[in-house]
Amino acid sequence: MNALPSEQASAALPLMTDRRGAAGVRQAADAKSRLWPQLGILSAFWAYVALSNILYAHNMQASLTALHVEDFFAPWDSRLLQHVLLYPVLIGCVWASVRMGWQPLWRKLPIQLLCGLGFAVVAPLGMDLSQMLLGHGQDEPVPGATNFLLTYGFGLALITGFAFYQRLRDSELRSAALERALTSAHLAALRMQLSPHTLFNLLHTIRGQIAWDPIAAQSMVVQLGDLLRRLLTAGEREFARLADELQFVRLYLELQQKRFADRLTVSVPDHDALARAWVPSLILQPLVENAVVHGLAGHEGAVVIRVEAVVSDETLSLRVVNTVAPGRPVGRAGIGLHNVRERLAIQFGERASFSATPGYDSVWIAEIRMPLLRDGPAAGRESQGIAAASWT
């Protein structure tokens, strides 16, 4: 029985409340993470201002003392206490200025100036209060409000610039995260395109065996089950071991070889002869599939398919070589070869290349050149990040 609309709304309300609460918690955490660095920068700036003011007054007073002018500047402890008393006022004014913003400028600029003037007016009062608390005379000259207005302007500009840098950095991080998510989704979509294409061709292969060799067809069904299990597992990963990838290729070619036993000869490197490397999952599958389909088409002769894996100068070369009908024209690349190019471009950028060209003696050569990844998927994701950065 379906729930009433009021019951559905009641059930959805706690979920919406939880989401809003989680969003509020994240916003509060983000605001807190931005507040402390800004507070630290403003505190360091004010400490520098206080120290500079004290040292300047001390040096000037020493020069005036040599001219027999005593107590022209307020003592250092009065100046230090003045800056301590003005510190919370500075924090409050800057916080209000940052919260208020600058848009629209014609409305916010007068208010921003009022904040700065307010701080500049309070500054001399802080000196009077500090001298009174410390018991010093109040006949020494007090720095003008203009000096503190300029100081406030420098502090506000420093915090505003740092806040802009934080927003720019957060924006770049979000853009990078979205780009990685988009790239992962794109690669997953490409792998999903390849899997049904492979299954479709293999089912046609088994159907051709059922009529005249049922026992071989049953054996092929078992092999197909193993192949599909590997296909589904590989389709969930971005990278796979080279040995696992070639084992998948070997299973696929063995299925095709059972159908075309009198025509098809295959050669795949042994496990012991392979370098320890990682490659994009299912990257060889469209190449061997293309080799079978286009190698057997257009003639009735024998076809040789050879898979090679060669390492040279930290570069891995994967080649699929197959014989074709003599004089057969070169056709357009299908979805499989297009996906190979696109995946290599996404995961490695200009560090990888793919070529599919005819060779001598009616041979077709499809070759992938990519960086040698010895450290597993982590190295592959790092290469993918380098490729994404090169795009931007």
Image (cartoon, grey):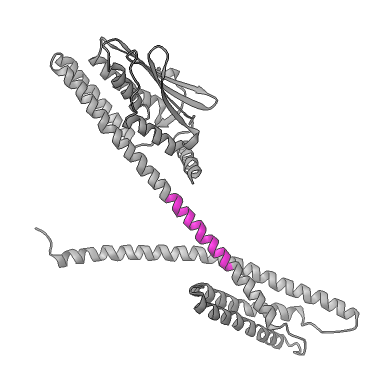
Q: Residue at x 28, y 21 (%)?
A: 293
Residue 70 among those drawn in magenta: no
Q: Which residue is drawn at 65% across and 78% down?
A: 149
Q: Which residue is drawn at 33% across and 37% down?
A: 190
Q: Which residue lies furthest to the left in this view?
A: 1
Is residue 195 visible in the rendered image? The answer is yes
Residue 176 among those drawn in magenta: yes
Q: Is residue 109 above or below residue 208?
A: below
> On the rendered structure, is 20 left or right of 169?
left
Q: Which of 330 and 111 is in front in this view?
A: 330
Q: Position of residue 91 (x, y in %)?
A: 57, 75
Q: Position of residue 5 (x, y in %)?
A: 15, 65
Q: Position of residue 9 (x, y in %)?
A: 20, 66
On the image, which quarter does residue 381 sit in?
top left
Magenta stretch mostly in which secondary structure? helix
On the image, which quarter does residue 203 sit in?
top left
> On the rendered structure, is 345 left or right of 234?
right
Q: Residue furthest right?
A: 67
Q: Which of 354 and 127 is in front in this view?
A: 354
Is residue 81 visible in the rendered image? The answer is no
Identify the magenta region: 159-177
The tally of labels here is 0
> On the rendered structure, is 220 left or right of 74?
left
